[in-house]
Image (tube, grey):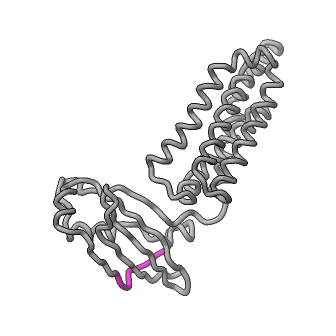
Amino acid sequence: MAAYAFSGIAFASWVSRLPAIRDGLDLTPGNVGLLLLCMTLGSFVSVSASGLIVLRFGSKQTIRIGSIMVGAGLVLAGFGTSVLVNPLAVAAGLVVVGLGTASWNTASNVEGAAVERAVRRHIMPRLHGAFSLGTVAGAGGGAGDGELPTRSLVWVRDSHGRAIDHLLLTLIADLAPPRLIFKRRSFVQSSTVSMTVHYHATPEELAEIGAGYVLSEVDCLRCEGGYFEHSLRIWSQRGALLANSVQVAAYRD
């Protein structure tokens, strides 16, 4: 049962920190998808060979090896994010995590089925329940690790198909939820004191975008003394800065 629980903890611990990995490496959604693909490839290779591995080493030894690989992969991914700040190091770590996780889970199920036959009782639901409890514990630990990140990246467009113009850029600049929510991890009443928008988009750039998506990037600059300030930038799909905004708001604890 412990093997299942720790497998769930290991899995949820890094998944719950994926936003921190994204922000630490300044990744786009596509780059995050490529990182996840690295883990998927490792899992695919490991699952394909897990039957032979279990036959060669036995389920208990495979569980030990798989858990060590997962631990090493998590350390490498964390080191690559916080120290090296290198996506390739993180990708390598996730490949190792994928290789270890698939073998670990396969061997755990083989061992669990053998124990179930030996005791002549249905225990697999309990074992998989232990995995689920492990994911809850791992996710709780990851989510509770410090403040929530205040930076967000969101692709937006008008749902009625209106072309992007200066009026829509102004609306988008005021759409982002107050960063104070992420700082305080709760809803706090606030109201805007001032908001400044600077437009950089040329008529040609707006014509090229049409009714397409633009990227809204927002982050908290300062939050203290009853006021918080956040900065927002709006980008085209080609990476051109269309507008930037600074908004100051007052809040009450």
Q: Is residue 177 left or right of residue 138?
A: left
Disc count in the image? 0
Tell me: residue 107, above or below residue 246. Answer: above
- Up the image or down, 235 lies above or below 17; here it is below
Instruction: Kindly identify the residue that appears in the image at 60 percent across and 53 percent down.
Output: 86
Whether residue 170 is situated above or below residue 75 in the rendered picture: below
Does the magenta segment cover residue 226?
Answer: no
**Residue 109, how many percent across, how many down?**
71, 22
Provide the major secondary structure of the magenta segment: strand
Please give the range of residues in magenta. 188-195
Residue 126 visible in the shown view: no
Question: Would residue 246 be seen by someone viewing this image from the given angle?
Answer: yes
Left or right, residue 66 beside residue 87: right
In this picture, residue 164 sits left or right of residue 66? left
Q: Residue at x 83, y 15 (%)?
A: 119
Q: Nearer the viewer, residue 232 or 239?
A: 239
Q: Quadrant of the N terminus?
A: top right
